[in-house]
């Protein structure tokens, strides 16, 4: 991707930390910030994959530091910041991108408690850990910009099911607003991006084949999903001085999804993926079926 960045969107002389930078949006965000002139620190659990992200950043003429770490381990977050300060002496931008969701999309009455806890621990607690580790140095340096990755599912309920993810992203939105209020007078801005589903060459076929693409288009006023280049402007706006008087905002990049109300008319395709885990529990549901066992007469 070739990105021409000008004016207040430039990040020359800035240092950015990006979590979850080994794949997906994390790689894209590293490329965007490096294209705007920032040196980049990339971190993720998959240390081997960080080398590919670092190569992209360095190919754009910027410095890149790769640090392995798990955002759910506070000591790892502290180490990422310590290594950043040792190499660059500053942290100007933090992009809290690391996250995880249960891709099975099972109904909540079937969701294992540990799966709920894992989503909240990664998507909310891990985000707080990284923020808590980086904020003191950012405040001492005069502020900067924190961009949290939220989701359209942090804004409202939906037929899409991942209870822990919804809870965590709703928490991200509220934490974003709290920290913006607490740190605004010291120059540290805190905002969030709330994307719809975005397609890439890796995910396009899966989304179309599964039926998810049709369902999301039926729910989105613009009747399509996002394309990755459409995240360039929103991320740079929040990360750069172009948004110098913006804090506490959850920026929806969603084709109008958050402005709409009601449910889609299309059926929910993921029920077909999940067998008994997609069957709603109600008055006529047997105890065996609710527990995931086959009904009488089934193999």
Image (cartoon, rainbow, N blue to C red):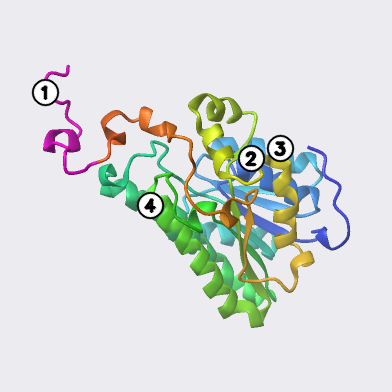
Q: Earlier in the sequence, mark 1 or mark 4?
A: 4
Q: Residue at x 60, y 78 (%)?
A: 183
Count residues near mark 1 (Cα–Cα under 10 Å), then give few for <14, some for 14-19, many for 20+.
few
Judge from the rendering whether residue 43 lies leftward or rightward of residue 40; answer left or right.
Answer: left
Q: Earlier in the sequence, mark 3 or mark 2?
A: 3
Q: Residue at x 37, y 51 (%)?
A: 163
Q: Please identify the dominant SS of the magenta region.
A: loop
Residue receiving disc 3: 55
Q: In this view of the protein, which residue sits in the foreground, 137 or 233?
A: 233
Residue receiving disc 2: 223
Dividing the image into 4 quarters, which one contains the C terminus? top left
Given this view, does label 3 or label 1 mark the residue nearer the observer? 1
- Up/down of 159 relative to 154, above or below: above
Residue receiving disc 1: 296
Count residues near mark 4 (Cα–Cα under 10 Å), then give few for <14, some for 14-19, many for 20+.
many
Residue receiving disc 4: 164
The part of the image, by quadrant, that contains residue 222 is top right
Given this view, does label 1 or label 4 mark the residue nearer the observer? 1
Q: Residue at x 50, y 29 (%)?
A: 211
């Amino acid at each position: 991707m070739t990105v021409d960045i000008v004016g207040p969107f430039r990040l020359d002389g800035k240092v950015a930390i990006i979590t979850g930078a080994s794949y997906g949006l994390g790689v894209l965000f590293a490329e965007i910030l490096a294209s705007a002139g920032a040196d980049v620190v990339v971190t993720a659990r998959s240390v081997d994959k960080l080398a590919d992200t670092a190569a992209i950043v360095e190919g754009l003429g910027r410095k890149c530091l790769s640090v392995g770490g798990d955002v759910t381990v506070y000591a790892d977050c502290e180490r990422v910041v310590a290594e950043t300060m040792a190499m660059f002496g500053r942290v100007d931008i933090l992009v809290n991108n690391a996250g995880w969701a249960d891709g099975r999309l099972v109904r909540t009455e079937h969701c294992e408690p540990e799966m709920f806890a894992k989503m909240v621990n990664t998507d909310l607690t891990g985000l707080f850990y990284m923020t808590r580790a980086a904020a003191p140095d950012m405040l001492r340096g005069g502020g900067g910009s924190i961009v949290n990755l939220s989701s359209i599912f942090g804004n409202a309920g939906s037929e899409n099911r991942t209870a822990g993810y919804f809870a965590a992203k709703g928490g991200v939105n509220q934490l974003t607003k709290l920290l913006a209020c607490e740190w605004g007078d010291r120059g540290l801005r805190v905002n969030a991006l709330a994307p719809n589903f975005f397609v890439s060459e890796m995910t396009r076929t899966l989304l179309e084949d599964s039926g998810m693409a049709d369902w999301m288009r039926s729910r989105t006023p613009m009747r399509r999903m996002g394309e990755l280049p459409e995240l360039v402007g929103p991320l740079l706006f929040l990360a750069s001085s172009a948004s110098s008087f913006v804090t506490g905002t959850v920026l929806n990049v969603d084709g109008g999804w958050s402005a709409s109300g009601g449910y889609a008319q299309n059926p929910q395709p993921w029920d077909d993926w999940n067998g008994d885990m997609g069957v709603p529990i109600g008055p006529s549901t047997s105890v065996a079926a609710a527990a995931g066992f086959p009904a009488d007469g089934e193999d």
